[in-house]
Image (cartoon, rainbow, N blue to C red):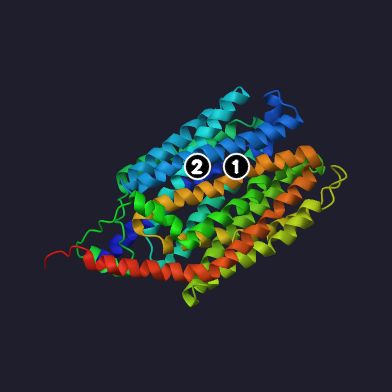
Amino acid sequence: MEERARFAGRELYAVILLALMNLFLFADQNLMAPNLTQIARDLGLDDVQRDVMLGGNISAVFWVLGSLITLGIGYLADLVPRKKLFIAVVIIGEIPCLLTGFARSYEQLFWLRALTGIGIGGAIPLTYSMIGDYFSHGNRASATAWIALAEGLGIAGGQLLAGFVGPEYGWRLPFIIVAVPNFFLCALMLFTVREPARGVTEESLKELIERGAVYTGRINWKEYLDLFRIRSNILVFLQGIPGTVPWGVFFIYLNDFYSQDKGYSVEAATLIVMLIGAAAILGGFIGGLIGNRVYNVNPKFLPLLCGGSTLAGIVPMAFLLNYPGSVGPADQNIAVPLGLGFITGFLVSVTGPNVKAMLLNVNTPETRGSIFSLFNLTDNLGKGFGPVIISFFIVRFGRLWAFNIANLFWVACGLVLLVMIWTFPRDEAALNETMTKRAGTMTRPEA
């Protein structure tokens, strides 16, 4: 019992450290959004270039290039020790984030943001691969909820920082502030965290591994290709592309939209977007805890929760986008936009941690890094190409119509999630059967 308590303490410490490092990584994600116009003026760009070059092109390279490179990182995560690889990836991401604070041209900003995207993209498959070996099936939705909480706090905190520091001290300083802490946390992880044993939380393997047996499963090309034969994997990929388009668009443009097009101050617009972010944090966290409960009642209730909450979030977002603007500085009543933003952010963020838990529950320990790199790619295709597509509609039809189109992408996302009501329980049962067979072939330690 005493040894088990020490083990649990070490794992809890490792997860807390992982969460903190992800918090600072994700704080970088939306640092440009509150100050798009300021950045454009500083770099000599007009309003169209602001929307297309800063909001569209940089967003695309940040998400897509980073995701393509992290496909390799995800594959490596299933072959080599994950702790050191995670540290290396974080450093690769934080160095260009720090240097963004010294960018003096659009070209410099473009490539520094591209390199920063590698850090965020690479950290995701490594984080969730390790989470899968820290927590069992029945607790993974709660565990991913805690990681989602850290990521959400990072996104919201970074955007809040940029929204209030940027107008006073310039748009560059927030990049420096959020980059520095992870250099110290990387050193802490290097010297104080142990690598988790693969497969130790699988019910059929746990006792064998605790007695000294070693799980020898490793990724290979056959297993990699087999990932695409799991129906739940394919459906998660399909929902991710349309599902992330609205987030990619709204957290890039909505702040500037409310300040420049609807007549609110930058600070008021930042508060609206920040409340959406805060609601997303709360919705992701509470949604993960609820997901954990409904999963333990019946696994098919988990995708039902995800699909239903996503579809419900479309309505308040439509009202938020089409709400009348402020007539001037004296009319800054933002109570209604704040309420609509909170409801939207809460509802549509329920899906995030629960989808990740479903992926962990239908894939083997040696493929989880790879599956999360693929998941990250499809997610980031939506985040990256979404603003590019919507920037085209902005040029053709204006911002309001473009954003309403973006909101409708959640319809496709929600419907795909509902289909998983049938596929997820079957794929999870197939994984349990596979793990039971592998337990029978593992080398048992001598008594």
User: Dot 2: what SS?
Assistant: helix
Q: Amino acid at mark 2?
A: Ser
Question: In the image, is 185 to the left or to the right of 385?
Answer: left
Measuring from the top left, give residue 49's x and y in whole percent.
71, 30
* In the image, residue 18 above or below residue 56: below
Q: In the rendered structure, are the residues bearing label 2 and label 1 in contact, judged by CB atoms less than 8 Å apart? A: yes
Q: Give the class, few, some or many, for how many residues have Cα within 10 Å of label 2's Cα (few <14, many ≥20).
A: many
Q: Nearer the viewer, residue 226 or 364?
A: 226
Q: Earlier in the sequence, mark 2 or mark 1?
A: 2
User: Dot 1: what SS?
Assistant: helix
Picture residue at 71% right of the left edge, 32% below the top = 50
Find the distance from the CA under tag 2 to the CA under tag 1: 10 Å
Res. 184 image quadrant: top left
Picture residue at 67% right of the left edge, 30% below the top = 39
Measuring from the top left, give residue 154's x and y in whole percent.
54, 47
Q: Nearer the viewer, residue 297 or 427?
A: 427
Q: Amino acid at mark 1?
A: Gly
Q: Give the class, few, some or many, for how many residues have Cα within 10 Å of label 1's Cα (few <14, many ≥20).
A: many
Q: Residue furthest bottom?
A: 297
Res. 42 image quadrant: top right
Q: Is residue 128 visible?
A: yes
Name the residue beneath numbered marker 1.
Answer: 384
* In the image, residue 440 above or below residue 375: below
Measuring from the top left, give residue 111's x and y in whole percent.
54, 29
Disc number for residue 124 = none
Disc number for residue 67 = 2
